[in-house]
């Protein structure tokens, strides 16, 4: 069987885990969420990992896991953490070893999804709800260059089954796609 790796990237709260899992089922690929795997391996939350190791240490764990997954799994759909493609050479690595799908969503929609969830997201921990919009807009803007390097960009607000089938067709090299 031919290798087939798909990496789903995008900002926190965009739906990488949910949409990635659905796309993996559609494509009949094993699915792995890097944040969930890091929580499982280290037996603590992502917030705790950030606190224990700092952002730089956490990003090193992400990078090591990404490389391990690629080495061990020729066929897999991997949902990455929101910052994974923005650090080190992770985006270039993913593009070299598979197809990268960017789930894109406007900042205002992301803010609505993230409001009240700071306890689950280390980058917004301590940010008041009234400051969240400015933070997300600025932070997302800083990550757009990395995300924009993906092979495929999809509007995450409308990533329904038909669009998933189109993305699958594009990834598998079929013609007539329209994400």
Image (cartoon, rainbow, N blue to C red):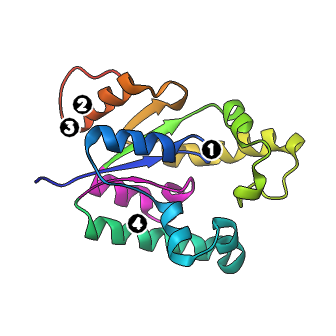
Instruction: Identify the image quadrant of residue 138.
Output: top right
Whole-percent x, y for residue 60 in the image: 52, 74
Horizontal side of 165 relative to 107 (left or right) equals left
Magenta residues span 75-98
Secondary structure of the residue carrying tag 4 is helix
Indicate which disc, 2 or 4, sits on the residue closer to the N terminus: 4
Residue 13 is marked as: 1
Residue located at (27% from left, 70% from top): 71
Is residue 179 visible in the rendered structure shown here?
no
Q: Is residue 147 above or below residue 87?
A: above
Indicate which disc, 4 or 3, sits on the residue closer to the N terminus: 4
Instruction: Identify the image quadrant of residue 56.
Output: bottom right
Q: CA distance from mark 2 to mark 1?
A: 26 Å
Question: What residue is pinned by disc 2?
Answer: 169
Q: Is residue 79 above or below residue 71?
A: above
| Eye-nearest disc, 4 or 1 | 1
Disc 2 crowd, CA 10 A, few/some/many (<14, 14-19, 20+): some
Disc 4 crowd, CA 10 A, few/some/many (<14, 14-19, 20+): some
Indicate which disc, 1 or 3, sits on the residue closer to the N terminus: 1
Please tell me which residue lies in front, 47 or 54.
Answer: 47
Whole-percent x, y for residue 156 in the image: 52, 31
Q: Are marks 1 and 3 in contact (CB under 8 Å)?
A: no
Question: What residue is pinned by disc 3?
Answer: 172
Q: Is residue 87 magenta?
A: yes
Q: Is residue 93 above or below residue 106?
A: below
Residue located at (56% from left, 69% from top): 39
Question: What residue is pinned by disc 4?
Answer: 66
Indicate which disc, 2 or 1, sits on the residue closer to the N terminus: 1
Whole-percent x, y for residue 1 in the image: 10, 54
């Amino acid at each position: 069987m031919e290798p087939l790796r798909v990496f789903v990237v995008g900002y926190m709260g965009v739906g990488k885990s949910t949409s990635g899992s659905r796309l993996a089922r559609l494509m009949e690929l094993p699915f792995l969420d890097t944040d969930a795997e890091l929580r499982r391996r280290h037996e603590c939350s992502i917030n705790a990992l950030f606190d224990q190791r700092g952002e730089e240490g956490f990003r090193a764990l992400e990078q090591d896991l990404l490389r391990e997954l690629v080495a061990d799994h020729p066929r897999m759909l991997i949902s990455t953490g929101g910052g994974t493609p923005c650090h080190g050479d992770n985006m270039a690595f993913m593009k070299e070893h598979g197809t990268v799908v960017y789930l894109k969503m406007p900042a205002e929609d992301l803010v609505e999804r993230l409001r009240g969830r700071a306890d689950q997201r280390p980058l917004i921990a301590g940010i008041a709800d009234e400051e969240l919009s400015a933070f997300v807009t600025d932070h997302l803007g800083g990550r757009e260059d990395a995300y924009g390097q993906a092979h495929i960009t999809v509007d995450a607000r409308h990533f329904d089954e038909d669009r998933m089938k189109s993305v699958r067709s594009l990834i598998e090299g079929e013609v007539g796609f329209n994400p």
